[in-house]
Amino acid sequence: MPTPELTQCKGVHVSWESTQGPYSVIAVPSDDPCGDAVADLGDHDGTSTFWTCTLPAGSSVALMVQDKNGDEAWSADIVVGSSDDKSCLSATQLASLKNSSSPSPSPSPSPSPSPSHSGTTLTVPAAVHTPPSNTGGTDGAGAINAGSNPSAGTLTIPQISGPVLAMSLLVGAITLIL
């Protein structure tokens, strides 16, 4: 799935394939996808929206689209790119930026131009992911981590096949020696 490039205070076109609308679109922290949304892109009857990224540069997020039935589709992790434009950031976000960066003269904010409809498109396929119910005694990996963060409890074929292949080679070598 193509993942959009997000840039602080710049617009991006987000779209998804039609399933059962209306659709809810949010941005969540990549390190806590089941936590609170850091941006709510709203509810939409159609299959796209234009959003001005109101997140500070360096934020690591993922976008999630949820349809009427609760089925979800996710983008990959996205790190918000930097921009000289800080006009969309809240006072809290601006204070956080000042505390986390070295002192440097800041340019005076210029009026923000009206949004154009150019940008990056996020396409969410019709095949959506619904996390399985957690019936075992372990914590779920979370919908976004199911494939992108295997260390969160989910083992993938490449994780398993590497050690199995190594063990098979070792057993084969020992057999040849004996």
Image: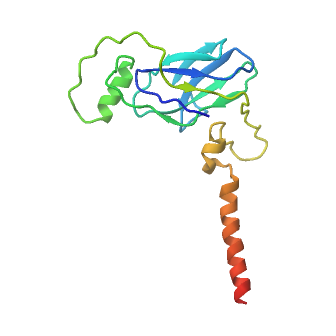
Image coordinates of residue 96 in percent, x first then y, are 35, 29
The residue furthest bottom is 178
Image coordinates of residue 12 in percent, x first then y, are 49, 21
* Quarter of the rendering occupied by the C terminus: bottom right
Label total for image: 0
Q: Is residue 17 left or right of residue 14?
A: right
Of all residues, the one furthest to the front in this rendering is: 118
Q: In this view, does 172 lie above or below 72?
A: below
Above or below, 153 relative to 44:
below
Which residue is painted at 74% across and 21% down in the image?
A: 19
Left-right relation of 25 to 91: right
Determine whether, in the image, residue 170 is placed left or right of residue 92: right
Above or below for 136 versus 166 = above
The reply to whether residue 37 is visible in this rendering is no
Q: Residue 98 at what x, y percent from top left?
A: 29, 29
Q: Residue 56's image quarter?
A: top left
Q: Residue 121, how many percent across, how many down? A: 55, 25
Residue 52: tell me if it is visible: yes
- In front of the other: 154 or 16: 16
Q: Which residue is drawn at 70% across and 83% down?
A: 174
Locate the N terminus and report the quarter of the image it occupies. top right
Q: Find the residue positioned furthest to the left.
A: 105
Which sits in the foreground, 5 or 8?
5
The structure residue drawn at horizontal position 65% and vertical position 17%, both measured from the top left corner, is 47
Residue that appears at 71% across and 47% down: 138
Image quadrant assignment for residue 23: top right
